[in-house]
Image: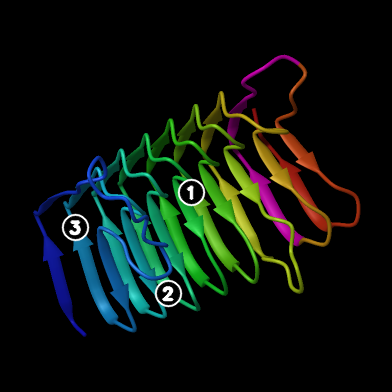
Amino acid sequence: QDVSIEGLALDGNKAQETFALNGCRGGGVFLLGCRRVAVRDIEVRNFRGDGISFQQNVDIVVERCHVHHNTGGGVHPGSGTVRYVMAGNRIHDNGASGIFYCLRTMHSICRDNDIRGNGGPGISIGERDSDHLVLDNTIHGNGQPGIDFRKPGRRSGDRVILRGNRISGNGGKGEIVVPARLEDILVEGNTITPGKAHRPALYVKAGCRRVNFVGNT
């Protein structure tokens, strides 16, 4: 509780390490069951797993970090973490998602991040990941959609606002992909440039409710 971790460079050994650590169990920086922790100005690179992962936490800040060239994802909030902020980070060239909202995370702000060239989606939002603001991020050139809502198994991740983001040149079915059974998704004031001809800016499956696409370029 009440900890600040700042100004470190963490250099992994992915070339020598044969075991990939799942991000739910570890990471270059890993927080479990913590409260009021700030992770600022950290560089995490070359880890065989996720760069920064935090599970079952309350009131976490990840700010101005540089997370790159890890074999897993960049930043991985999960397992019921609530009230967290991810701001001003550079997240690029990781093997999986840039930011991976795992299971049951709620009430977050994701703003002013630069998320590029990751192997998976720029941002992946999944099961019971609700009540999030995704604001003013640059999401470019990732291997899968810029923002990808994963298909819910039992309960969807609803009430998400995507506002003022610059989303371009990503892979998959569209720049923003929303599967069936999601509700209350607001896509407002974003600038969206599909990576390939005929690929949609927004792809929404049948069976959603109140998905609003407003004032985008």
- Taking the spot 56% from the left edge, 46% from the top edge, the residue there is 163
CA gap, disc 3 and disc 2: 17 Å
Q: Which amino acid does label 1 sit on?
A: Leu
Mark 2 vs 1, N-terminal side: 2
Apparent side of residue 193 relative to residue 28 in the rendered image (left or right): right
Mark 1 packing: few (<14 Cα in 10 Å), some, or many (20+)?
many
* Label whose residue precedes the other's in the sequence (3 or 1): 3
Image location (x, y in percent) of residue 170: 57, 29
Q: Is residue 44 left or right of residue 134?
A: left
| Residue at image coords 33%, 53% | 87
Locate residue 64 relative to residue 123 in the image: left or right.
left
Image quarter (top left, top right, bottom left or bottom right) of the N terminus: bottom left
Secondary structure under badge 3? strand
> Which of the labelled discs sits on residue 135, or is there none?
1
> Label 2: which residue?
83
Query: Which label sits on residue 40?
Result: 3
Q: Where is residue 2 in the image (x, y as percent from the top left)?
A: 18, 82
Q: Residues within 10 Å of mark 2 (few under 14, many from 20)?
A: some
Residue at 83% across / 62% down in the picture?
A: 181
Q: Write the start and end of the magenta stretch as one range.
A: 183-197
**Relative depth, front residue between 151 and 6:** 151
